[in-house]
Amino acid sequence: MDDTTAPPDLPELDLDDVVKAFRVDPGDDLDLSDHDTRATVGWDGDKEQGKAAALAANARLEALQELLYAEGKRRVLVVLQAMDTGGKDSTIRHVFDGVNPQGVKVASFKKPTEEELAHDYLWRAHAVVPADGQITVFNRSHYEDVLVVRVHDLVPEERWRKRYGHIRDFERLLADEGTTIVKIFLHISPEEQAERLQERLDNPEKHWKFATGDLAERKRWKDYIAAFEDALSETSTDHAPWYVIPADRKWYRNLVIANILVDVLEGLDMQWPPEEEGLDDVVIPPID
């Protein structure tokens, strides 16, 4: 059996249904309460089958990433955003498991440094966008400047509202210059977040992942949801679409994201570089 395809007895994810349900179309007035965080749209199998299908999609993604790297002509940017405990790190770990680290880079956006604050807010994002042949994953992103900045009132509303237009123009520039952009919002429920925070408290080996500040941020849940709804509505475009992915079920999250990325890469119609002429006559010489 080809290891880049799912076993024949596995159900197939209906990607058309997934895209229809989860993609934020330009002009949509997003209401996240309409999106079930435990939905399994497009999947008729069970959890174990879903895990197996996700592994098959991961293998296919690995092969496509190698082709992207070898061709060296196109770039892919994956943006991950979520509430705290939403699963960004876990998504990267599972969906990109096995891909060549030479061709996949992860850029994490934490509290800006003094140098970053001395520049415009898009400066640090532009510096780490993918080069030819690369997939770059933004673990958080330039969207923090219309999310955290808004919720914590770090700049006046008049200023951060203009940033939706800046971001659209920035992503238009990247797309025009050959970058394919996929933006993923990992949508979890407050109940799921509470369980994940409690797991970190209950397991000493996960204490390093817990900060009391997480609880302060949790109190701002409704403010963050409003900020996400506006950001996704304002910046989902044909060339840089947002997907609202149900993320309470980790196995389904991985299955859907891996398949979306496989579909995107297959749509690039990539080609292997031309081989050197005369290879059929080459003989590997022995070492004396």
Image (cartoon, grey):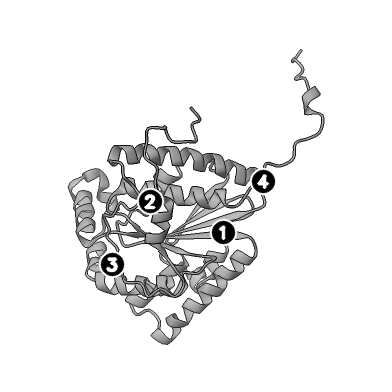
| Residue at image mark 4 | 71
| Residue type, numbered disc 3 | Asp
Mark 2 or 3, closer to the camera: 3
Q: Earlier in the sequence, mark 1 or mark 4?
A: 4
- The residues tagged by marks 2 and 3 sit, at their Cα atoms, a distance apart of 25 Å
Which percent across, then down, holds residue 25? Answer: 44, 68
Which residue is more in the foreground, 217 or 33? 33
Q: Earlier in the sequence, mark 3 or mark 1?
A: 3
Indicate which disc residue 89 carries.
Answer: 2
Describe the element under mark 4 as helix, strand or loop: helix
| Residue type, numbered disc 1 | Thr
- The residues tagged by marks 1 and 2 sit, at their Cα atoms, a distance apart of 22 Å
Residue 118 visible in rendering: no
Vertical relation: 162 (above or below) 278: below
Q: Earlier in the sequence, mark 4 or mark 3?
A: 3
Tag 2 near tag 3, CB within 8 Å: no
| Residue at image mark 1 | 180
| Residue type, numbered disc 2 | Asp
Mark 3 or 1, closer to the camera: 3
Describe the element under mark 3 as helix, strand or loop: helix
Mark 4 or 3, closer to the camera: 3
Indicate which disc residue 34 carries.
Answer: 3
Q: Residues within 10 Å of mark 4 (few under 14, many from 20)?
A: some
- The residues tagged by marks 4 and 2 sit, at their Cα atoms, a distance apart of 28 Å
Describe the element under mark 1 as helix, strand or loop: strand
Tell me what residue is drawn at x 26 percent, y 54 percent: 38
Vertical relation: 15 (above or below) 120: above
Residue 154 position by quadrant? bottom left
Classify residue 23 as left or right of residue 35. right
Which percent across, then down, holds residue 277? Answer: 81, 33
